[in-house]
Amino acid sequence: MIESVVANVEVKSTLTKKDLQQAVGAARNAKALVPQFVTLFQAGYVPPRVLNYVVAYEGPASMETAQGWLHEIHSDLGISVSNLPTGDERLSHPSPSIDTMFILGKGFSYFDNVPNGFSKLSSRVGQPGVKWIYADSASGNLLLQFLFLQTAIANISGRWLNPIPYLSNFHVGSLRASTAA
């Protein structure tokens, strides 16, 4: 059940455009699942949908290439990425597909809706169309992934599963009772 998932992590030996397309499709399907919670309270950052990370040991020579693949795949699959608000309200806007890409020894890319990213409010106001942040980075990529995951679970939430939507199509044929021991 999607209510028990915080993040999906796809690990690839070598990231190719075809692998990224598969990951984008899987992420889009996961994002379409709407968690059914009853929420009483929450404190801290709670991701707006399940997070979808791609981690690869090898990949293209630069993150610009991988980011270009992502834009092409979104276009090919008809995935539109609307402009994000410039303030903190952007935290409640989920990525329409993957949230991050990490290629070890190469760099990272992330959807700019995280509370602890590199983008600053002043740069967002000046460039409201920016949705992704990426960089070539020879080290620290797994640390960044860990920090993103840590932020996603470092919250307090008083919520529980609302089973009613799951039970709407559940029917029992002939219910019986027995007094036998």
Image: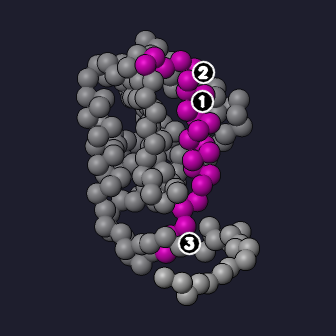
Q: What is the tally of numbered marks visible in this picture? A: 3
State the predominant SS element of the stretch in magenta. Answer: helix
**Extent of the magenta region:** 13-38
Q: Quadrant of residue 21?
A: top right
Distance of mark 3 from mark 2, alpha carbons?
37 Å
Residue 96 placement (x, y as % from top left):
58, 45
Residue 102 placement (x, y as % from top left):
39, 29
Q: Quadrant of residue 47?
A: bottom left
Q: Quadrant of residue 72?
A: top right
* Badge 3 amino acid: Pro
Give the residue at x 31% y 67%: 156
Distance of mark 1 from mark 2, alpha carbons?
6 Å
User: Closer to the camera, 27 or 94?
Assistant: 27
In the rendered structure, which disc, 3 or 1, sits on the residue that comes first in sequence? Answer: 1
Residue occupying the far front of the picture: 181
Decide if residue 64 is on the left or right side of residue 44. right
Give the residue at x 53% y 18%: 16
10 Å neighbourhood of mark 3: few (<14), some, or many (≥20)? few
* Badge 2 amino acid: Lys
Residue, disc 2: 18
Residue, disc 1: 22
10 Å neighbourhood of mark 1: few (<14), some, or many (≥20)? few
Give the residue at x 45% y 17%: 14
Residue 34 placement (x, y as % from top left):
58, 59
Looking at the image, residue 31 lies above or below residue 22:
below
Looking at the image, residue 25 lies above or below residue 136:
below
Residue, disc 3: 163
Looking at the image, residue 28 lies above or below residue 40:
above
